[in-house]
Image (spheres, helix red, strand yellow):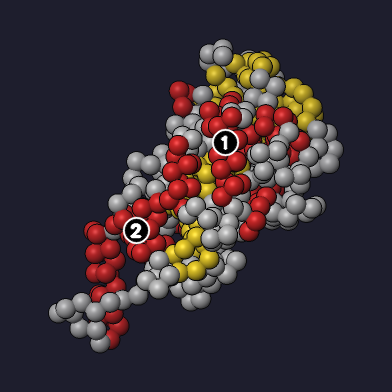
């Protein structure tokens, strides 16, 4: 078993505390952090399963507008995505344009003439949840107003609009401390009083998995997955494989209410083959990563829809235990990933990273990490073929084509 890869806040004056010298500053900082813990927190008991939804950035970027959002909301309901678990409809960058004389953030009047409150009401009327985007810096990644210095004001505004989810980016941050900056918005959201899923999007640069659990509900672990429509390196580069490698050592940091976010899905954007899309979707589910579709779901093929709404694969992602997969075995270009599931069940994901077909000849009976024992009493179900392919008293045999996946569930019960 060889795993692949390897992998301040600001002091404030406090009455009665001398600030001269290193001891005084350290004491003030310690007390400030303690007070922050007492009077600021995130909303618990939400995002107990990885969030599922849609974000328009990968397919629309700044071309987003309220007509598209309404059409996407309608499509999520009519095409079966909502019933499959996709509930958050998230606006990314470029919905905002400026601030008024009082500092209140304003929606682009050309793209969103009805305003965010009315748009949020429409999203809610379709049984979906409303997500929005901002940035911890002065400006967003596309140069729109960020939330720095306006955290509470923006949080209160979002609450009046009925926002349920905030993606909070990390552009134009200057010398800001990441943990401190994300705490500021966490506390502002809590003070505003409306439960909001808080998505930390600082690209893994400051190892948010080490400090994000008490601040946000999910955190990006990598830079953006390559999101150019004609890109030919979405498989490698900062694409599917490199993100899988970066996720390899982070399983212990994920769990109910705090998730490692492998970034938005590229399924349906034309950058991956059908086999690569199945592998991409399977591994995001194995990681218990949020499943945020990023394609134009108004006009997608039946094949794309079948991948995004494969309920047996989604069930792996949405498993109640919330355990992220670990790499169990590597043999050349073959990797086998393992994930414990609720009710004493297990998932194994076989992926072929290479360009040649691989022969599978695997005994699944094993003891893993002295915690999980798999005997010969399990049924083996292929979650893409939707059929039972054997049991653990037999050797699992087959062929795995290049860049393809075999995702199986071991259960003592026949579906």
Identify the residue at the far bottom of this view: 20
Q: Is residue 342 left or right of residue 240?
A: left
Q: Is residue 17 left or right of residue 139?
A: left
**Gap in Å between the C-alphas at discs 1 and 2?**
28 Å
Image coords of residue 184 (percent x, y) = 36, 64
Q: Mark 1 = which residue?
A: 74
Image coords of residue 328 (percent x, y) = 61, 37
Q: Residues within 10 Å of mark 2 (few under 14, many from 20)?
A: some
Q: Quadrant of residue 381?
A: top right
Nearest the viewer among 7 and 82 is 82
Identified at 56% across, 43% down, the residue is 70
Q: Quadrant of residue 403?
A: top right
Position of residue 399 relative to residue 217, above or below, is above
Q: Is residue 30 left or right of residue 404?
A: left
Identify the residue at the far left of this view: 16
- Tag on residue 156? 2
Image coords of residue 254 (percent x, y) = 47, 45
Image coords of residue 350 (percent x, y) = 69, 33
Identified at 53% across, 28% down, the residue is 83
Cβ–Cβ under 8 Å for marks 1 and 2: no
């Amino acid at each position: 078993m060889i795993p692949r890869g390897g992998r301040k806040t600001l002091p404030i004056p406090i009455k009665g505390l001398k600030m001269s010298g290193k001891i005084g500053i350290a004491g003030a900082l310690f007390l400030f952090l303690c007070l922050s813990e007492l009077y600021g927190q995130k909303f618990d008991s939400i995002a107990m399963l990885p969030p599922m939804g849609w974000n328009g950035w990968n397919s629309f970027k700044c071309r987003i507008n309220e007509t598209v959002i309404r059409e996407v909301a309608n499509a999520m309901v009519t095409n079966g995505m909502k019933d499959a678990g996709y509930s958050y409809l998230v606006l990314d960058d470029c919905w905002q344009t400026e601030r008024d004389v009082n500092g209140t953030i304003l929606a682009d009047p050309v793209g969103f003439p009805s305003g965010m409150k009315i748009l949020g009401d429409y999203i809610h009327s379709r049984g979906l949840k409303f997500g929005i985007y901002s940035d911890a810096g002065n400006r967003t990644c596309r140069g729109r107003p960020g939330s720095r210095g306006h955290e509470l004001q923006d949080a209160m505004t979002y609450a009046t609009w009925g926002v349920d989810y905030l993606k909070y980016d990390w552009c134009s941050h200057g010398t800001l401390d990441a943990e401190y900056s994300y705490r500021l918005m966490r506390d502002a959201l809590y003070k505003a009083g409306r439960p909001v899923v808080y998505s930390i999007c600082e690209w893994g640069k400051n190892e948010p998995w080490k400090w994000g659990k008490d601040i946000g509900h999910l955190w990006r672990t990598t830079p953006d997955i390559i999101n150019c429509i004609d890109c030919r390196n979405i498989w490698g580069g900062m694409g599917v494989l490199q993100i899988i490698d970066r996720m390899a050592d982070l399983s212990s940091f994920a769990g109910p209410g705090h998730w490692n976010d492998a970034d938005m899905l590229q399924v349906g954007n034309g950058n991956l083959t059908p086999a690569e899309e199945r592998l991409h979707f399977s591994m995001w589910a194995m990681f218990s990563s949020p499943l945020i579709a990023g394609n134009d779901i108004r006009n997608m093929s039946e094949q794309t829809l079948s991948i995004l709404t494969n309920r047996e694969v989604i069930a792996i992602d949405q498993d109640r235990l919330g355990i992220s997969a670990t790499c169990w075995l590597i043999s050349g270009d073959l990797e086998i990933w393992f994930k414990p599931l609720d009710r004493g069940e297990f998932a194994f994901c076989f992926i072929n990273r290479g360009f040649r077909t691989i022969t599978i000849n695997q005994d699944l009976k094993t003891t893993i990490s002295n915690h999980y024992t798999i005997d010969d009493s399990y049924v083996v179900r292929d979650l893409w073929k939707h059929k039972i392919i054997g049991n653990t008293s037999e050797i699992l045999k087959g062929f795995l084509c290049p860049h393809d996946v075999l995702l199986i569930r071991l259960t003592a019960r026949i579906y």
